[in-house]
């Protein structure tokens, strides 16, 4: 449970829902508005009840194919990029109208592998998604298929299962729900084996579990069970509980978010704070340090606040916006580490200044915080604030 939401009875508060192509299109690749309306209704109600919802959705390529090739005569020769470019607008338009009906605002977010692996891109994406959540807007996320091509190795994320796990990690979600056509993970392919049993809970990834992945059963989406299992691995390793469930089950999303046991549950063994700390610590370069005054130490350690320019005494090293830096007090004690929103030259210029002077000093403004509390982990014990 999120510490800051401990007063709500719902076990999950920030939730990423992933919806695959087959769930929201028919066999002619047409968007299935009825299926979309059902999922949108579930997400919108939860959002209006106070949960923080994000939707990762496929369907752009299929929707584009429906436009260019309604009779399916071309086989698969049409360019995936072109199809995605045509279909993404239609997909988004449908979602926008459906969410509008519930008076919930949405925002299109298209991501690429390069954006996510680039430090600055990662920071910008995280800030944008957290900002949207704060404004009570539902981000609707897809891979930017137009700029990622299969032909360049490592260029595409490729399947939205993996993308959904990356997003869940970036926003520190409590729960990732991967909706598919089957009820969850089975002991064998339920389409072929009448004795196939649903596995209710997977606490560890063993070779036996990995072997259940197999190839995709479905020709239109890209994922398949092995992509889903990889996504579950990625998400649970970064502290996000994951559930596979059937998208056609009545009211499945609210039921899961409210703690009902359906589908296959992958509890996370990792503590989100610990994994973020590990990640940040692994990125530190000892030479990149921001030295802060006692007031800032107190604000960080006791107040759980962001680091503001006013509390900064100096900065050492050369770092870029998006780099992880150490925060130390004037006696070289480690107070925290976090992702700097400004590069080292900027930090030199804005140290000791009030946040409202940043814009006029630099000529631009990436936000009031030099390190936002969402991107910061305190390393010092509470006593550090008393010295
Ligand atoms: N991004 C692709 C689309 O919108 C789907 C990828 C997937 O099927 O996982 O069509």
Image: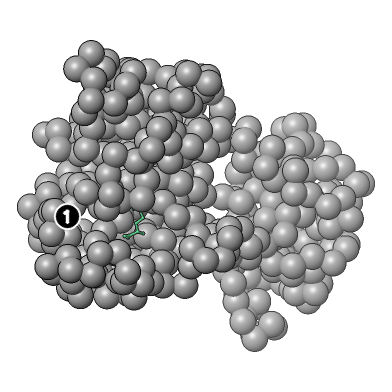
Whether residue 87 is visible: yes
Give x and y (percent) for residue 154.
58, 58
Report the residue at 76% width, 36% height from top: 380
Provide residue 370's location: percent of width, then percent of height.
67, 63
Q: Quadrant of the N terminus?
A: top left
Residue 41: percent from the left, percent from the top? 14, 48
Ligand 1's quadrant:
bottom left
Instruction: Single out the residue that lies furthest toward the left.
Output: 34
Report the number of discs. Answer: 1
Vertically, is 343 above or below 306?
below
Name the image colouring: one colour
Determine the image quadrant of residue 280. Answer: top right
Mark 1 sits near ligand 1, with its Cβ under 8 Å away: no
- Examine the image and state in which quarter residue 262 appears: top left
Q: Is residue 288 above or below residue 243?
A: below
Identify whether 233 is placed above or below 269: below
Crowdedness near tag 1: few (<14), some (14–19) or many (≥20) residues, C-alpha within 10 Å? many
Q: Which of 330/32 is in front?
A: 32
Instruction: Residue at 75% x, 43% y: name it.
Output: 282
Q: Nearer the viewer, residue 39 or 210?
A: 210
**On screen, 320 above or below 117?**
below
SS at mark 1 in the image: loop
Residue found at the very far right of the displayed protein: 331
The answer to whether one can see residue 5 in this image is no
- The quadrant the C terminus occupies is top right
Q: Is residue 146 left or right of residue 63?
A: right
214 left or right, relative to 320: left
Residue sitting at x 32%, y 21%: 188
Residue identifier under label 1: 25
What percent of the width, then of the height, locates residue 68?
20, 75
Residue depicted at 27% across the width and 44% down the height: 218
């Amino acid at each position: 449970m999120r510490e800051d939401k401990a007063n709500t009875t719902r076990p999950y508060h920030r939730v990423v829902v992933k919806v695959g192509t087959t769930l929201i299109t028919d066999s002619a690749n047409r968007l299935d508005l009825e299926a979309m309306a059902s999922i949108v209704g579930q997400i919108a109600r939860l959002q209006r009840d106070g949960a923080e919802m994000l939707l990762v959705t496929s369907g752009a390529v299929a929707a584009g194919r429906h436009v260019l090739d309604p009779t399916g005569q071309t086989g698969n020769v049409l360019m995936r990029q072109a199809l995605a470019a045509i279909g993404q607008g239609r997909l988004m338009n449908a979602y926008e109208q459906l969410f509008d009906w519930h008076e919930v605002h949405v925002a299109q977010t298209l991501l690429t592998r390069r954006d996510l692996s680039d430090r600055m891109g990662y920071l910008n994406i995280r800030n944008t998604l957290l900002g949207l959540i704060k404004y009570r807007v539902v981000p609707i996320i897809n891979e930017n298929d137009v700029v990622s091509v299969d032909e360049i190795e490592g260029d595409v994320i490729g399947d939205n299962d993996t993308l959904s796990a990356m997003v869940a990690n970036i926003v520190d979600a409590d729960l990732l729900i991967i909706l598919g056509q089957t009820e969850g993970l089975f002991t064998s392919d339920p389409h072929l084996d009448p004795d196939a049993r649903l596995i209710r809970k997977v606490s560890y990834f063993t070779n036996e579990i990995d072997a259940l992945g197999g190839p995709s059963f479905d020709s239109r989406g890209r994922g398949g069970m092995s992509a889903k299992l990889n996504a579950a691995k990625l998400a649970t390793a970064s502290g996000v509980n994951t559930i596979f469930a059937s998208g056609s089950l009545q009211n499945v999303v609210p039921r899961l978010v409210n703690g009902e046991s359906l589908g296959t549950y992958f509890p996370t063994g990792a503590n989100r704070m610990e994994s973020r700390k590990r990640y940040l610590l692994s990125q530190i370069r000892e030479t990149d340090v921001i030295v802060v005054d006692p007031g800032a130490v107190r604000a960080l350690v006791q107040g759980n606040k962001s680091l503001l320019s006013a509390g900064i005494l100096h900065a050492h090293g050369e770092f870029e916006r998006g780099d992880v830096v150490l925060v130390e007090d004037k006696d070289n004690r480690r107070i925290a580490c976090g992702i700097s929103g400004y590069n080292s030259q900027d930090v030199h210029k804005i140290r000791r200044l009030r946040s409202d002077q940043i814009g006029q000093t630099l000529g631009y403004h990436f936000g009031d915080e030099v390190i936002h509390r969402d991107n910061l982990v305190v390393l010092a014990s509470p006593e550090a604030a008393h010295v």
